[in-house]
Amino acid sequence: MEAFPIPSDTYKLGFIGAGKMAENIARGVVQSGLMPPSRISTSHSNRIRRDAFESFGVSVFSRNDDVIEESDVLIFAVKPQVVKKVVSQVKPLLSKKKLLVSVAAGIKLKDLEEWAGQSRFIRVMPNTPSAVGEAASVMSLGGSATEEDADIIAKLFGSVGKIWRGDEKLFDAVTGLSGSGPAYIYLVIEALADGGVAAGLPRELALGLASQTVLGAASMATKTGKHPGQLKDEVTSPGGTTIAGIHELEKGGFRGTLMNAVIAAANRSRELSQN
């Protein structure tokens, strides 16, 4: 198989789709210093979306064709329902010299490869905290994607958080957990803040405390390597305030509800892939 290496230090990155996910990834990459915005492009006709990208130096074209021509690595960041249409439309421009990446939930590599007419594809499931350098991403390689291609994408998404490599069969569960998970945590932060207000705290203080508490707890879990149950026990003294709060969460089915949310989102991802 003929190889078309991509220069890892000078390649140009293009986004097909200029929504929030594309913006978060592009913004995070620029903020990380991995590459300057002058090497990144996308296209959109809406002035608000154009302004969003241009505000941090990314080039915005009027046509996807221009983005493809300009780029070595292309990230398809469109809604799952329109991926087939978009990839099929630009298929004639997708040479094997270009590394293709999809971040669309529920869309399988075999379908992407069929629509694109080539298998130099990598599927990535990131999440929105890429905008602040704290993404959780998983990637899986298509048929002719090389280890060098994998290194490029690992560094790209590693610049905006942490990235793991996993079998594609895991992606629906990944989508349900880390892909949709930030929304669950935002609900937790909002609810904690509301509880603080109900207990007498000013709104601004309650929200600040709730946000920092979630951030601190997550950092403890990742940096100490301790099991979350052990960390929970270390906060929970006999007959104290924390166990009283945990008792209420258990009565409300807190853990089971979160588990069910992950499963529901994973099932929806499977539905999208079957459609």
Image (cartoon, rainbow, N blue to C red):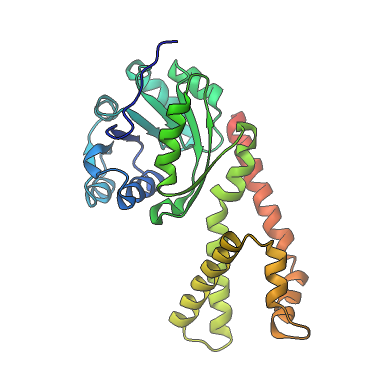
**In which quadrant is the N terminus drawn?**
top left
Q: Residue furthest front?
A: 224
Return the residue nearer the eye: 18 or 154. 154
Of the pair 116 and 158, the residue shown nearer to us: 158
For residue 79, above or below residue 142:
below
Q: Whole-percent x and y of residue 162?
A: 49, 48
Above/below status of 55 relative to 85 = below
Please name whichever residue, 171 or 269, is drawn nearer the observer in this view of the structure: 171
Quadrant hosting residue 191: bottom right
Seen at 55% across and 22% down, the residue is 110
At a point 49% along the width and 20% down the height, the residue shown is 113
**Residue 154, image x and y in percent?**
45, 38
Residue most toward the top?
1
Seen in the picture, residue 46 relative to 200 is either above or below; the reply is above
- Residue 206 left/right relative to 72: right
Relative to 96, 38 lies left or right: left
